[in-house]
Every structure is written in structure tokens, then in C-alpha cells.
Image (cartoon, grey):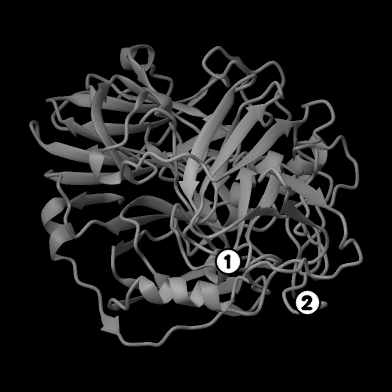
């Protein structure tokens, strides 16, 4: 499970068919917009509060999107399917009823080669609408999976065909973008093979780390969100559903968030409180998280019954780490081994050797190790939360480590993204930004009123950009919590030759300016990947202006 030999990867074949491009439903958003002011920066435009579509923005299904997709080429079509359904999962000594893709956690891994076309049918067997978001991929905008903004949500009993060119090799993943569904079992890895892969290795592991509470003693993510809002009748900032169709072309429909049309309101939980108190981390400069997840998993297994990876001494192993958690940063180390970091968020970096990694929600890191002889713990410590996840590397005889093991490497040299440099192949050309967008992150645990520029999310928001621009987003964290900020549809560059990423941790009191090239037209989310923060309002929309 989640283990691949290099030879098997190179020899794997997938059937090809020549289906044409499937067009998504007309989408967009209605209401007020954000437009560029005279100084080139963005200001809120409240002139369209009546519900009309803000004029002059590229639609997710517009000709600009289709032309960008055409330029990506017409490679062979690879066919896949995922079924989102209620199921029972064995987490390793603990069986829960939850939602997942099929009957396994993570869902069946998706693999494709850069240059191919993805054709995936999502079948929704859930009691609630859903979508798929392709985290890390620069997909065409109407395939990005944000209900009420880029597509209609997929109703219970319905299917949806995602079809788009895949151009971004690396370690990515797939998850819903509807309410708090991500804090169930709805996720899987998406590995895009590089046809010119420069690395050589004997084995490859995909390691998905997750925080878990669904189905434990009556807990559900929806009930936890309600508890975080102090029992208020919270309807989730979420997104806007489009099941009734737009009011105007590209317009939004009824709101749903975690509870709305096609969904289920969160019932009061009979389980214990899941609000986390006094969880602090020096590395995270303050509060570590909001939610007390009772279990932390590696590839769907608890530390009491972990997955075992088997290898031979001397094997070169590529490990692809994915933090699929909703509220937890992980400090990760492999006992007895140093790791050589080769990629972050799927993009190559100048190689750097480390003892441990610090991985925020939705971040990915690829590392290389040379396996030693023996039995070794792969530990993911829930930073500031006093819990951990575990897997085991076994190359010889010996007793397996216990669930609470803390390898010394956890406290050695630590790599974070700001200490890495982009590999030359993905290094951005130096250029002054044409446009700067300021995004101040604010909110508090007490009120749970997370926002960007003090505006809670609405799909009518617009931060305007234009195709061809170099855009700088300046994140300023004015809250006491850290926020993993994610930009859809693009990769950005960290300052001073830093790596290319799509998600970046912004610590309390810190300012980080990231640059990207506006080369993928449409309407794109920018949000915190703490699920409970984004669902409470820390999201906004970046929109391309028509030329």
C-alpha cells in the first residue's frame, strides 16, 4: 500500500481513449467586486450590491480559459473514477463510519504523466453535495472544483466529469471544496510523473498525514465547527451552491456552507468537546491549533497499528509527504536517517539535507533517503498538540517501535520552506511586480471571526489582476495564530530565490510577499488551509479582468 518500485512505476501502462473536451457548466459569482484603484492596488467596489455580475471579469468557462487550455496541448487521455460514499473504515484497531472515496483511506491513488489529459468521473453517493479540487495543479478554471464560483456542486446521486490537461509534475492531492468535508476521509494523492525525471531511486512511498475525529465518540466536523462558533447557528462561509442555477449568467445561487441546500445541518454532538485549549508551539510562534483531533494517521492507520514499509539496506527511497490534515502542523522525522529535500509542493528545490521537516496543512515535501539496516520509526509529531502519527521502516529483524516513540531526529536540524531555494529549472525570472495585493489575516480564537482584510468570504469579492502581469501578494498576519495560505491555479515564488509553492505558512506577526505570473485566467480562491478558518471566512477571490 502506497509503496512503489521505480521499475514498476516506469513500466505501468494506462489505457488511452480519445474523448473530446468536456465543458463545465457556466459558473461565476454575483454581487460586489474588487477592482484596481488608480495606484494599481485593489479596492473594494460596492457598486454591484444588487446582485448583478461585476462587469469585465473573465468567466470560468469563458473563451480566455478555453484558449489557455488549448495551448496546453492535446496529450493522451487517461481515464479514472472516484466514488464519494458513506463507508466504514478500519483505522487500525478503531472502526469508524465516515465518508471516503471508495472503501479505503486515503482513496485509491491517482497517477498520471505530465502532458497527459485527466478524464475523471466523480460519482456522488453522499447525502450532501460535493466537488473535487486538484490541489497544486494549474487546471482550467471551470475544473477547479469551487462550488458557486467555478462549477455547480455535484448533487447526491449525480456524477460530474472532470477533464483537463495536466502540466505540473510533482506531488499533489485531491480533496473536496465543500463545507468541512475535508475533515472526513475524502482525500487521495495525485502523483504527476515527470517524463524527464532526473532522480534515480529503488522505491517510492507516498505518505499522507492526517488529523482524525470523524466518528470518534459521536464527533463530526460539522459539530466541531458549531462548537468553535460557541453554538451559534453558523451556516459556514463556505461557498455558494448553484443547484438552482445562476440568477444571471455567471451568477451565484443559494448559500450552503456546511449546512445548506443538499446538505445536512450539524446536529449537536453527544461526544466530548473538541476545542483545543492551551496548545502552543515555539516553532509556530503561538497557538498551535483550534481542534483536538484524538487520532493522527499515516496512510489511514493509527500509531497503535501502523503501516510498515519494507526495503533492503542500501535502497534509495523517495518519500512524498502530504499533510492532508485540517488543523495540524506536523514535525516529521525518520529515526536513524537524515533526509535530503528535493521538492516542495511538487516543485524542485536545490537539495538540502535535514533531520526533520515542518509541514503545514496541504504542504508537500519530497525527500530522498538511503535505508539503513534495522527497524525505524517514521514519526509525524502533531506540533504543539502532544500527539503523533507513526509508520515503520523495516529492512531487517528487530522489535517494532511503540506508538509514542520520539526519534531524536525530531529535535535536530529542521527545514522549513523559507530556508530552501528554487532549483534553476523552476526559478522565476527577476521582475518588478506590476500589481501588489495586500492581504491582512485577522481573527481570534475567542470570536472565531477569521477574515482577509476584515472582509469575511463572499463569492462576490474580487481582487483584480490582468493576464501577463507579475502579481505580488503581501500576506500580513495580524492574528495570534499561524495560517497556511493557498492560492488556487498558480504557483508563487518566495523572496530572495526561494522555492516555488502553492501553499505557505504565515506565522503570527509575520509579513511574507510572494510573486506569481498571471497566466491562468479565471476566478481563483485564495484562502487559509486551516479548514475551520476558511469555513469561518478566511477566503477571498482573485479575478482576471477582461482585456
Q: Is residue 99 visible?
A: yes
Q: Position of residue 93 (x, y in %)?
A: 48, 40
> What residue is rendered at 13% in x and 37% in y?
316
Q: Is residue 120 visible?
A: no
528 horizontally vs 133: left or right: right
The crowd level at tag 2 (other Cα within 10 Å; few <14, some 14-19, many 20+) is: many
344 horizontally vs 464: left or right: left
> What residue is rendered at 80% in x and 78% in y?
248
Q: Which mark is residue 397?
A: none
Image quadrant occupied by the C terminus: bottom right
- Relative to 54, residue 450 above or below: above
404 horizontally vs 265: left or right: left
Mark 2 or 1, closer to the camera: 2
Mark 1 lies on residue = 85
Give the quadrant of residue 252.
bottom right
182 horizontally vs 47: left or right: left
Q: Position of residue 241 (x, y in %)?
A: 75, 67
Q: Which mark is residue 246?
A: 2
Amino acid at each position: 500500500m502506497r509503496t512503489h518500485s521505480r521499475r514498476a512505476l516506469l513500466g505501468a501502462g494506462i489505457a488511452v481513449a480519445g474523448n473530446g473536451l468536456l465543458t463545465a457548466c457556466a459558473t461565476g459569482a454575483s454581487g460586489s467586486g474588487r477592482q484596481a484603484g488608480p495606484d494599481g492596488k485593489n479596492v473594494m467596489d460596492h457598486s454591484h450590491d444588487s446582485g448583478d455580475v461585476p462587469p469585465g471579469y473573465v468567466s470560468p468557462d469563458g473563451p480566455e480559459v478555453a484558449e489557455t487550455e488549448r495551448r496546453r496541448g492535446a496529450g493522451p487521455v487517461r481515464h479514472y473514477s472516484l466514488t464519494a460514499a458513506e463507508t466504514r473504515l478500519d483505522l487500525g484497531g478503531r472502526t469508524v463510519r465516515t465518508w471516503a472515496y471508495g472503501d479505503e483511506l486515503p482513496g485509491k491513488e491517482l497517477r498520471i504523466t505530465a502532458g497527459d489529459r485527466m478524464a475523471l468521473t466523480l460519482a456522488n453517493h453522499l447525502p450532501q453535495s460535493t466537488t473535487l479540487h486538484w490541489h497544486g495543479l494549474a487546471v482550467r478554471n471551470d475544473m477547479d472544483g469551487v462550488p458557486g464560483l467555478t462549477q455547480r456542486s455535484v448533487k447526491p446521486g449525480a456524477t460530474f466529469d472532470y477533464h483537463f490537461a495536466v502540466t505540473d509534475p510533482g506531488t499533489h492531492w485531491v480533496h473536496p471544496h465543500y463545507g468541512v468535508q475535508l475533515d472526513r476521509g475524502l482525500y487521495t494523492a495525485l502523483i504527476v510523473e515527470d517524463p524527464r525525471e532526473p532522480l534515480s531511486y529503488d522505491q517510492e512511498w507516498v505518505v499522507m498525514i492526517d488529523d482524525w475525529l470523524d466518528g470518534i465518540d459521536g464527533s463530526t466536523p460539522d459539530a466541531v465547527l458549531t462548537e468553535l462558533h460557541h453554538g451559534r447557528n453558523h451556516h459556514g462561509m463556505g461557498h455558494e451552491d448553484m443547484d438552482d442555477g445562476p440568477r444571471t449568467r455567471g451568477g451565484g445561487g443559494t448559500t450552503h456552507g456546511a449546512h445548506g441546500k443538499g446538505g445536512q445541518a450539524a446536529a449537536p454532538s453527544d461526544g466530548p468537546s473538541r476545542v483545543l485549549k492551551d496548545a502552543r508551539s515555539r516553532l509556530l510562534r503561538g497557538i498551535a491549533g483550534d481542534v483536538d483531533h484524538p487520532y493522527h494517521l499515516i496512510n489511514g492507520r493509527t500509531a497503535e497499528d501502523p503501516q510498515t514499509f519494507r526495503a533492503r539496506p542500501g535502497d534509495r527511497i523517495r518519500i512524498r509527504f502530504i499533510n492532508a490534515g485540517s488543523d495540524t502542523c506536523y514535525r516529521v522525522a525518520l529515526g536513524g536517517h537524515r533526509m535530503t529535500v528535493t521538492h516542495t509542493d511538487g516543485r524542485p528545490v536545490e537539495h538540502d539535507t535535514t533531520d526533520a521537516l515542518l509541514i503545514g496543512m496541504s504542504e508537500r515535501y519530497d525527500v530522498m533517503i538511503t535505508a539503513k539496516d534495522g527497524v525505524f520509526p517514521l514519526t509525524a509529531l502533531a506540533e504543539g498538540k502532544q500527539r503523533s502519527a507513526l509508520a515503520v521502516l523495516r529492512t531487517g529483524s528487530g522489535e517494532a517501535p511503540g506508538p509514542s516513540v520520539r526519534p531524536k531526529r525530531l529535535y535536530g536540524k529542521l527545514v522549513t520552506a523559507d530556508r530552501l531555494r528554487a532549483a534553476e529549472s523552476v526559478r522565476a525570472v527577476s521582475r518588478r511586480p506590476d500589481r501588489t495585493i495586500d492581504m491582512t489575516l485577522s481573527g481570534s480564537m475567542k470570536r472565531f471571526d477569521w477574515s482577509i482584510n476584515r472582509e469575511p468570504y463572499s463569492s462576490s469579492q474580487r481582487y483584480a489582476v490582468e493576464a501577463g502581469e507579475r502579481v505580488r501578494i503581501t500576506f500580513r498576519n495580524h492574528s495570534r495564530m499561524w495560517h497556511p495560505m493557498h492560492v488556487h491555479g498558480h504557483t508563487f515564488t518566495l523572496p530572495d530565490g526561494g522555492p516555488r509553492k502553492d501553499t505557505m505558512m504565515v506565522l503570527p506577526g509575520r509579513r511574507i510577499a510572494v510573486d506569481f505570473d498571471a497566466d491562468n485566467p479565471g476566478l481563483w480562491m485564495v484562502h487559509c488551509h486551516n479548514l475551520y478558518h476558511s469555513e469561518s471566512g478566511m477566503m477571498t477571490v482573485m479575478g482576471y479582468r477582461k482585456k
